[in-house]
Amino acid sequence: MRLQISIACTALALIFATACAEAAPVRVSLAAEPYPPFASQNADGQWIGFEVDLADAVCKAAKLDCEIVQTAWDGIIPALTSGKIDVIWASMGITPERSRQIAFTIPYYSTPAQFIGAKGDSFDFTPEGMKGKTIGVQTSTVYADYVGRVYPDAIIKTYSTQDAANADLAAGRLDLGLADSVALSAFLAGEDGKCCEVKGTPKDPIFDGGIGGGLRKDDAELKARLDAGIRAVYKDGEFTRLEKKYFAFDIGTPPQP
């Protein structure tokens, strides 16, 4: 009898543990560094922005219980692969190099890259013309990868946040900055950004993949549900509603049939 009771209790414990594991929320991670208007913290410490609202909408459409968390950008892929988070939702560009490490959802938005620099300055964007120029980029981004590959003779300065790169540009410590056009537009519209203007829009396959949610390669079911959620928010018009809340132009990447 004691053996039967023990077996029954063990079985119940396993069922309870499994139920708890199934009920655990999906940890959707933003980058800890502010990246307005996509994600930043307000005065109360709450995360706000386009990607925050979009994550909520996609999780709702996918019938997923999601929890917004934050992870330092330069450690966000290791945090995913080690199981500390479940989804990267942090304006991460889909690239072949990253796709060798992790899986991605279908793209949920796409915007061009832009160089910005001081008003009145002009640039020759050939590798030879950029020799000795100082370019600021956020670390571990497609923009850092691009300038390092295309302009090996330029002076590349990397920053943990885009705000820090923008501050150095405004202070005259950089010749150019390179980042997402939407993120830079907010800087250019502000008081500090009056120093600068758009200097060029580089074209390269590294920018063509769009922005997607990062997942572990073995999380095929989660990917399928998030992909379905992204398709749903496009189909029912929720993406357009959120887009218009934050932007005066289209950043959508409508899913292919």
Image: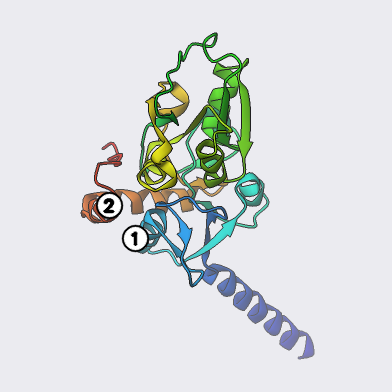
Q: Position of residue 222 (x, y in %)?
A: 47, 53
Mark 2 → mark 1, Cα distance in angstroms: 8 Å
- Amino acid tagged 1: Ala
Position of 47 with respect to 82 (left or right) is: left
Q: Quadrant of residue 39?
A: bottom left
Q: Position of residue 36 (x, y in %)?
A: 43, 52
- List the single residue furthest toward the top: 128
Q: Do the residues labelled 2 and 1 touch (CB within 8 Å)?
A: yes
Q: Is residue 106 visible?
A: no
Position of 10 with respect to 40 (left or right) is: right
Closer to the camera, 193 or 157?
193
Residue at image position (65%, 51%) is 79
Assign the N terminus to one quadrant of the image: bottom right
- Residue under numbered circle 2: 239
Residue at image position (68%, 51%) is 82
Q: Position of residue 184 (x, y in %)?
A: 41, 40
- Amino acid tagged 2: Phe
Q: Residues within 10 Å of mark 2 (few under 14, many from 20)?
A: many
- Residue under numbered circle 1: 57
Q: In which quarter of the image is residue 253?
A: top left
